[in-house]
Image (cartoon, rainbow, N blue to C red):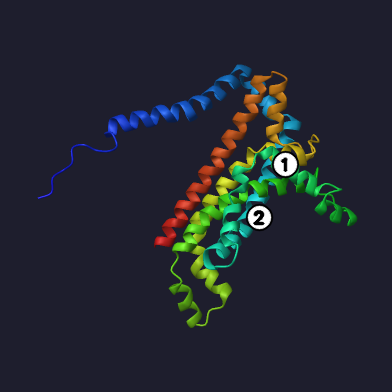
C-alpha cells in the first residue's frame, strides 16, 4: 500500500499562493497601479487632451503600424527558420540556432547603432539602396527593420518546439496520397503551428510596441513622421512632465492589453479547433 508523503518539496497552497501574489504585486500590479495613479492627476480633460494630441496620435500610428508589419514579417521568416532548424541537419546548425537568441542578449542601443550604420546612406546595405534612390534609415522602413530584428526570436522559439514534436508520418501519408508540398503544409502542418504562431506574434508585437533602444537611432525621430510613442514618453519624462508621460504610457498599456487579449482568444479557439 502506497503511503502519502506528508513533507512536500513545494510549500502548501496557501503559502505558495501568498508568495506568488506578493511577487506579482511588487513586480506587476503595483507599478501598473502607480501609472494609473500618476496619470489621474491630470484629470479627465487633461488626460484626453494629452493622449489625443496630434503629435501623440502620429506616434501611435508609427508605433502600431511598424510593430504590426515587423511581427507579420517575423511570422513568415520565423516559420521558415524554425522549419530549417527543426527538420534539417547541416554544418553550423548549432551556431545559427544559438544566434537566434542574439537579440535577447545584445544591448538594444548596440543593435540600434549597428543597424543605423548598416542601413544609413553610407552603410553597406544603405549605400546600395541609396543608388536606387531608396532611403531606409530615418524612415518607417528603418524602424520596421529594427523591430523585426528584436522580434524574430519570439516566433522561432514558439514554433520550433511544435515542429520538432510533429510526427512526420502525417506528411509522408500526404505525399503518398499525391498531395503537393503546399497542400501538405496548408492542411497538415499549418493547423498544428497556428496556436504557437499566434503566441509568438503576440509576444513580438508587444515587444515591438515598447521598444526604444534599438529604434531611437535608426528612426530619425521626426515628429509626425518617424517619432515613436516610447520617445514621446521619454521626452515628457525629461521635461519632468510625469503626468502626461504616464498618460501616454497608460494608453499604450491598455492598447497592448486589448491586443494580447484578442490574440489569446483567437489562440484558444484555434487550439480547440485543432483538437476537434
Provide residue 194's location: percent of width, then percent of height: 51, 58
Which of label 2 and label 1 is nearer to you?
1
CA distance separating discs 2 and 1: 19 Å
Q: Name the quadrant of the C terminus.
A: bottom left
In which quarter of the view is residue 112 placed?
A: top right
Q: Is residue 62 visible?
A: no
Q: Is residue 208 visible?
A: yes
* Residue at 54%, 69% in the rendered image: 185
Provide residue 27's location: percent of width, then percent of height: 48, 29
- The residue where tag 2 is placed is 73
In which quarter of the view is residue 63 placed?
A: top right
276 or 164, which lies in front? 164
> How many numbered marks, from 0 up?
2
Q: Any mark on residue 186, and which?
A: none
232 with respect to 38 (left or right) = right
> Which secondary structure lies at badge 1?
helix
- The residue where tag 1 is placed is 112
74 with respect to 170 (left or right) = right
55 with respect to 248 (left or right) = right
Of labels 2 and 1, earlier in sequence is 2
Taking 54 as reference, is 3 above or below it?
Answer: below
> Which secondary structure lies at badge 2?
helix
Provide residue 272's location: percent of width, then percent of height: 41, 57
178 or 138, which lies in front? 138
Amino acid at each position: 500500500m502506497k503511503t502519502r508523503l506528508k513533507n512536500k518539496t513545494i510549500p502548501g497552497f496557501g503559502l505558495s499562493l501568498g508568495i506568488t501574489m506578493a511577487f506579482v504585486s511588487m513586480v506587476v500590479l503595483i507599478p501598473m497601479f502607480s501609472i494609473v495613479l500618476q496619470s489621474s492627476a491630470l484629470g479627465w480633460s487633461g488626460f484626453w487632451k494629452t493622449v489625443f494630441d496630434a503629435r501623440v496620435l502620429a506616434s501611435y500610428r508609427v508605433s502600431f503600424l511598424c510593430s504590426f508589419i515587423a511581427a507579420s514579417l517575423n511570422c513568415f521568416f520565423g516559420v521558415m527558420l524554425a522549419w530549417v532548424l527543426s527538420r534539417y541537419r547541416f554544418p553550423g546548425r548549432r551556431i545559427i540556432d544559438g544566434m537566434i537568441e542574439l537579440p535577447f542578449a545584445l544591448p538594444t542601443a548596440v543593435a540600434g547603432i549597428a543597424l543605423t550604420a548598416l542601413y544609413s546612406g553610407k552603410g553597406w546595405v544603405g549605400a546600395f539602396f541609396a543608388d536606387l534612390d531608396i532611403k531606409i534609415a530615418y524612415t518607417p522602413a528603418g524602424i520596421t527593420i529594427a523591430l523585426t530584428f528584436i522580434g524574430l526570436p519570439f516566433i522561432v522559439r514558439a514554433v520550433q518546439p511544435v515542429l520538432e514534436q510533429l510526427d512526420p508520418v502525417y506528411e509522408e501519408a500526404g505525399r503518398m496520397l499525391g498531395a503537393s508540398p503546399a497542400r501538405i503544409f496548408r492542411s497538415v502542418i499549418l493547423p498544428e503551428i497556428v496556436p504557437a504562431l499566434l503566441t509568438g506574434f503576440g509576444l513580438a508585437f508587444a515587444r515591438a510596441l515598447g521598444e526604444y533602444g534599438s529604434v531611437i537611432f535608426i528612426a530619425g525621430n521626426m515628429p509626425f513622421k518617424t517619432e515613436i510613442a516610447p520617445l514621446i514618453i521619454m521626452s515628457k519624462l525629461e521635461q519632468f512632465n510625469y503626468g502626461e508621460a504616464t498618460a501616454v504610457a497608460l494608453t499604450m498599456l491598455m492598447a497592448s492589453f486589448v491586443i494580447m487579449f484578442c490574440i489569446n482568444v483567437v489562440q484558444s479557439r484555434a487550439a480547440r479547433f485543432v483538437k476537434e
